[in-house]
Image (cartoon, grey):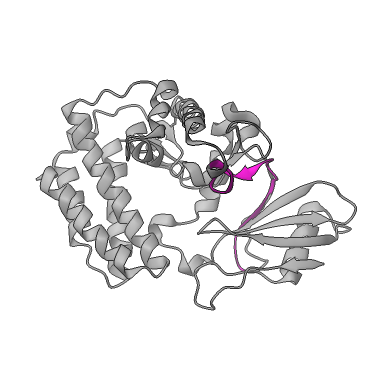
Amino acid sequence: MDLRPISRDVHAFQQPVTGEDIQHIARRAFGKAARLASAVELGGGMYNTTYRINLDGAQESFILRVAPAPEIQFASEHELMRNEYASVPYFAALGDLVPRVLFADWSREIAGRDWMVQSHLPGVPAPERLGAYSRDLWPGFFAQLGQIAGRVHSVRGPHFGPVAGAGYPTWSAAVIASITEIADDVSRLGLDAADLRKVADIAAEHGKVLDEVSEPRLLTGDLWTVNTMLDAHSPKPLITGILDLDRTLFGDPDADWTIRMATAKHDERAAFWDTYGPRRLSPAAAWRGLVYEARHLGSIRLERHRLNNPDGVRDTYQSVAAVLAQLA
């Protein structure tokens, strides 16, 4: 087998699995006679360890994603791969834009980690392809993202909170629990989480404003440019797939990462709203947006710590302080 891992520091969060484990995975997923021709680790993602695998005698490639070891996962990111698996039926309306799950194994008998095998989506990662187009074509890309996000946000859910699990009966309960989990993770790292706990307290004090959101809708959790694939040969940006939908939840569409990114700058991404629909912010919605921003910043703090970016971690404290000044 041609095994091509990415060279990583022994202390890096993402860690490879052995060639023997990958062969074992292939036999479990495709049958005892399956033999791997190659396994190439893919970069780009920052959480799961991902391989493009090929079987002897097969033309089609597959994607193997291996979750981090359970003991190194943050509580606020607990079993994200299982959450993605539970989300699959809710993404049915997106058809072949999302990969098919061909096999999933939560037994942890191989490498002590969850893993799944998915279909290989056509195209090239958008970060590698979008820059090849002139910027006057970029609005078309963001218009497609707006249409996709709108379709996702139209899906109704049975509860608030992560797709997997029992969830919460109210949006305020889900938001407060999420911020508290993030704060607990920050504290376990030895970092100051007082600012995030203050946000959780304010959210609890004004829970009725959060609970104006009474219908849970599906949120992608992480969809933006880095999670999209583009056609390799199209004369203009054409989205062929979306990836890594493991942070899905049910709640207020305004709380989605996609909406945060769409509003972050006034540039070509303004075309997002042409297909998604106009955004009309009431004072209550604007206030909720501040709470959501604090939650996003808490997650960013954790990710920057995981990536050994202390300056980035420090920056989040200033950003949360700015949010708190507006919430107070």
Q: Nearer the viewer, residue 111 or 97?
A: 97
Q: Quadrant of the C terminus?
A: top left
Position of residue 296 in the picture relative to residue 136 (left or right): left
Q: Position of residue 135 (x, y in %)?
A: 48, 36
On screen, residue 230 above or below 23: above
Q: Position of residue 22 (x, y in %)?
A: 73, 64
The quarter of the displayed image where residue 277 is located: top left
The quarter of the displayed image where residue 317 is located: bottom left
On screen, residue 192 above or below 9: above
In the image, which residues are magenta? 112-130
Q: Is residue 195 magenta?
A: no
**Residue at point 23% right, 36% down?**
288
Position of residue 319 in the picture relative to residue 248 (left or right): left
Position of residue 325 in the picture relative to residue 122 (left or right): left
**Residue at point 33% right, 33% down?**
254
Q: Nearer the viewer, residue 39 or 262?
A: 262
Q: Quadrant of the N terminus?
A: bottom right
The quarter of the displayed image where residue 53 is located: bottom right
